[in-house]
Amino acid sequence: MAKISGSEIRPGYVIEHDGGLWVAVKTNTVKPGKGGAYNQVELKNLINGTKLNERFRSAETVEQIRLDLKDFSFLYEQGDALVFMDTESYEQLELAKDFVGERAAFLQDGMMVTVQLYEERPIGISLPDQVTLTITEADPVVKGQTAASSYKPAVLENGVRVLVPPFISAGERIVVDTNEITYVRRAD
């Protein structure tokens, strides 16, 4: 593990602070008229999700944590657990649905995901940024509607609701952003 100065903390860095693992969400270098400069950092706990605002002076040092990233393949859903398989060792890993959150609805058989591990313990998961899904329900287009509010609600095959342009109808395949849960474009 590398020790870094408090002024070197950037968004995305994972650090050990007060006995916990924290990811830097936002950073802001502050240079007051009186006194030394400091780095104002918004931290989010990787284990329980609590947030904390902390000041780090350049003289302070913190441990920067290196996370192991491993590729896993999604296998199936079992009750409240999601089962993944390590693509190298073929070992299976069970994660609670709550761990993945609302994006669990986008998991498809065989989908490749990246799991962040710290000391062999999963602390984060990354899904592909975009997935292709079929629309099962789409509201009809209302004639005379202005262009400003032309998006209409639609339901995807996984039960998730998104807003789509009026020319999209039920049965079509679209690309959806899994981070923002928004329509991107028609699938090829």
Image (tube, rainbow, N blue to C red):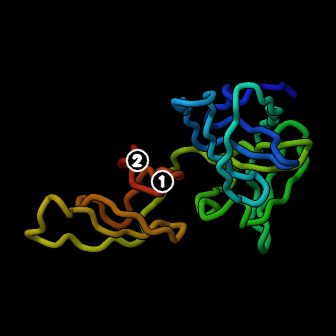
Identify the residue under disc 1: 180
Camera-near label (1 vs 2) is 1
For the point 57% across and 41% down, the residue is 26
Identify the residue under disc 2: 187
Q: Nearer the viewer, residue 157 or 126?
A: 126
Can the viewer see residue 112?
no
Q: Residues within 10 Å of mark 2 (few under 14, many from 20)?
A: few
Q: Is residue 40 above or below residue 162?
A: above
Tell me: 73 left or right of 166.
right
Tell me the kind of residue under disc 2. Answer: Ala
For the point 63% across and 32% down, the residue is 38
Q: Nearer the viewer, residue 29 or 33?
A: 33
Q: Element type at marker 1?
A: loop
Ranked by sequence position, the earlier of labels 1 and 2 is: 1
Q: Is residue 35 above or below residue 100?
A: above
- Rendered location of residue 55, percent (x, y): 67, 40
For the point 54% across and 67% down, the residue is 158
